[in-house]
Amino acid sequence: MHHLEHLRQLGLVDKDVHGQYTIRRDIRVGVLRMFVGRGRLMVPRFLFYATFYSSVTAALTTMLLGYLDWYSIVLLGLLMSVCVVLWYEALKIWREQPFPEQED
């Protein structure tokens, strides 16, 4: 009760007339800051960046197939390395998800 009252004073929970506590707002701390979503559906923030840069890399690869100069190859190499890093970070954070999906 002490901790719930402290949370109520901080404005994070509400207490009704029956003494039931409810969450007022969603607070993300620790590893949860790296996720986007609500409730059970949470995905890492890096997933959006990884998807975006993977699409850009795929689109540029198809557009530059006829113009493979050294700077096109360098550009595609840099974009691919960015994609690898972003996908690695997204998957690493996804594995650290504190609430693994459970089947009901």
Image: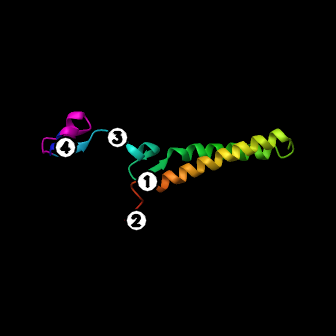
Q: CA distance from mark 3 to mark 1?
A: 16 Å
Q: Nearer the viewer, residue 17 or 100?
A: 100
Q: Identify the residue position indicated by label 3 in the image.
A: 27
Q: Identify the residue position indicated by label 1 in the image.
A: 97
Task: Point out residue 32 in the picture as x, y percentages from the top left corner.
Answer: 41, 46
Mark found first going from the N terminus, 4 or 2: 4
Q: Are marks 1 and 4 in contact (CB under 8 Å)?
A: no
| Vertical arrangement, residue 24 with respect to residue 93, above or below | above
Give the residue at x 81% y 38%: 71
Q: How is the image coloured?
A: rainbow
- Magenta segment boundaries in residue numbering: 6-19
Give the residue at x 20% y 34%: 9
What kind of element bears circle 1? loop
Q: CA distance from mark 4 to mark 3?
A: 16 Å
Q: Nearer the viewer, residue 56 or 71?
A: 71
Q: Nearer the viewer, residue 41 or 79?
A: 79
Mark found first going from the N terminus, 3 or 2: 3
Label 3 sits on what residue type?
Ile
Within-10-Å neighbours for mark 1: few <14, some 14–19, many 20+: some
Label 1 sits on what residue type?
Gln
